[in-house]
């Protein structure tokens, strides 16, 4: 792949619209209730290229509040809650019409992982229980539903990370007790899985702290992989670590269950001789937080962000302080180049009832501001997944709003954060 093609791929992956004069800061934004009930809790959510959002939840926690159409039922002898379940655990939300329909997901998607193919097809892999080695396919068409392939993965994948590659394939990295990676679709002349010792090195005994690793494609075609408190640059085609990055100062973990969040910041110098790429990692929990939380001691989450130029010859982390501690936060790139930091708790860690004091105020991070003036606190919300959505068409860039589709986990409500003109 040429350097130009690689940069083009990264450009569209990041949706860099910062040069658009129609886009301004989100100071005038507000919350708008679109649906009081969609019936499915959004553990996972993905925007597709037809302006529809696919929503899905774990299947082993009992019935949802959305029935499957035409008397359909899911018969699953391995389900841990309902062997026969006539409710949907997935839905498709139509952004343009503010409507939704039930989808049929067959096995447990709890803490699965996914990526979107170049043709717009969502590939969701792994999960829990009977779904941990399966591949699910959802194509963006008006009446499409989930297609599922059993045992299509080389290994069980729970809390893994997927990333689309320039050649159109997907790499699937890690997961619980899986210190390796694999590709989808499979190649007949390649091993099913490749060992990745870095995942062994970052595994804290009995706690892990390296699940759902942060993965980004670098401008040189290699993969930046962050787990626990450090990162590598991986030549995935040859299974060679080409660079080892320094540990984040302080050494505290940023990966599940000490869950922080990360983004690859917008590439602002695409015409330069040497293109810089920067990664921002925010939040997490101090060492020992998960164990302490299981005993009722919910220590303060991390209030720091670490930023690094991954393309530098001798890269170093630059530390910044957020307005509040945050574990289990999410970060989303906005079309104007800023970063939305949302969700999470101020104390504890990820895991079952292991956190306290929800952080209700999202924060805008402005990467181009001077150090010390990059954070701005915004209006409060409730813990939710989020994706940027277009106002009209995904490809009509001037019509992009600063929008975030919000699925209210507690009330099953769909909400949207929009920029006022």
Image (cartoon, rainbow, N blue to C red):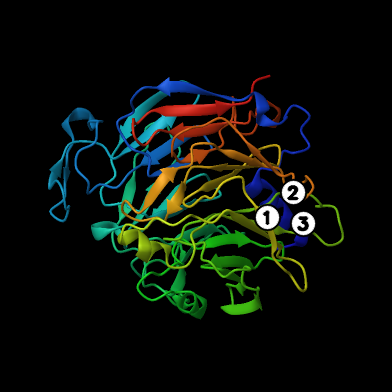
Q: Is residue 328 above or below residue 93?
A: below
The quarter of the rendered structure image containing the N terminus is: bottom right
* Circle 1/circle 3 CB separation < 8 Å: no
Instruction: Determine the CA span between mark 1 and mark 2.
Output: 7 Å
Which residue is more in the foreground, 188 or 17?
A: 17
* Circle 1/circle 2 CB separation < 8 Å: yes
Mark 2 neighbour density, 10 Å: few (under 14) some (14–19) many (20 or more): few
Please count the marks in the image. Answer: 3
- Secondary structure beneath label 2: loop
The quarter of the rendered structure image containing the C terminus is: top right
For label 2, the residue is 372
Which circle marks residue 320 in the picture?
A: 1
Q: Position of residue 180 (x, y in %)?
A: 45, 74
* Circle 3/circle 2 CB separation < 8 Å: no
Nearer to us: label 1 or label 3? 1
For label 3, the residue is 4
Q: Is residue 186 visible?
A: yes
Tell me which corner region of the image, top left, top right, bottom left or bottom right, holds residue 174: bottom left
Lower position in the chain sequence, tag 1 or tag 2 = 1
Q: Is residue 399 above or below residue 372?
A: above
- Secondary structure beneath label 1: strand
Q: Position of residue 163 (x, y in %)?
A: 53, 58
Q: Position of residue 386 (x, y in %)?
A: 50, 39
Q: What residue is shown at x 42% (from left), y 38% (from top)?
A: 54
**Side of 66 relative to 152 (left or right):** left
């Amino acid at each position: 792949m040429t350097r130009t093609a690689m940069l083009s791929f990264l450009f569209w992956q990041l949706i860099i619209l910062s040069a658009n004069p129609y886009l301004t800061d989100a100071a005038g934004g507000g919350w708008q209730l679109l649906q009081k009930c969609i019936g499915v809790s959004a553990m996972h959510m993905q925007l597709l290229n037809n302006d529809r959002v696919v929503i899905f939840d774990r299947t082993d926690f009992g019935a949802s509040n959305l029935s499957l159409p035409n008397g359909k039922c899911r018969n699953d002898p391995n389900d841990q809650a309902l062997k026969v379940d006539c409710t949907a655990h997935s839905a498709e939300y139509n952004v343009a019409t503010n409507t939704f329909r039930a989808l049929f997901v067959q096995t447990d998607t709890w803490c699965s992982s996914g990526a979107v193919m170049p043709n717009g097809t969502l590939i969701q892999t792994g999960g829990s229980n009977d779904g941990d080695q399966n591949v699910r396919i959802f194509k963006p068409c008006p009446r499409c539903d989930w297609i599922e392939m059993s045992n299509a993965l080389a290994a069980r994948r729970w809390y893994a990370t997927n990333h689309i590659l320039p050649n159109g394939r997907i790499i699937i990295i890690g997961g619980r007790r899986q210190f390796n990676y694999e590709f989808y679709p499979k190649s007949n002349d390649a091993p099913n899985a490749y060992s990745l010792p870095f995942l062994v090195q970052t595994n804290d005994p009995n706690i892990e702290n390296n699940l759902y690793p942060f993965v980004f494609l670098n401008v040189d075609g290699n993969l930046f992989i962050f787990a626990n408190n450090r990162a590598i640059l991986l030549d995935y085609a040859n299974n060679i670590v080409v660079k080892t990055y320094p540990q984040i100062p302080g050494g505290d973990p940023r990966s599940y269950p000490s869950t922080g969040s990360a983004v690859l910041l917008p590439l602002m110098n695409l015409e330069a001789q040497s293109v810089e790429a920067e990664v921002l990692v925010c939040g997490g929990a101090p060492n020992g937080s998960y164990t302490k939380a299981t005993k009722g001691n919910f220590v303060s989450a991390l209030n720091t962000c670490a930023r690094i130029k991954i393309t530098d010859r001798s890269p170093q982390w630059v530390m910044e302080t957020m307005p509040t501690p945050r574990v289990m936060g999410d970060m989303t790139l906005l079309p104007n180049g800023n970063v939305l930091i949302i969700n999470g708790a101020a104390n504890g860690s990820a895991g079952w009832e292991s956190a306290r004091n929800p952080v209700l105020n999202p924060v805008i991070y402005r990467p181009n501001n001077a150090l010390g003036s990059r954070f701005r606190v915004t209006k409060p919300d409730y813990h939710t997944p989020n994706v940027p959505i277009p106002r009209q068409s995904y490809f009509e860039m001037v019509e992009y709003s600063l929008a975030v589709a919000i699925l209210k986990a507690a009330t099953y409500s769909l909400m949207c954060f929009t920029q006022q003109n």
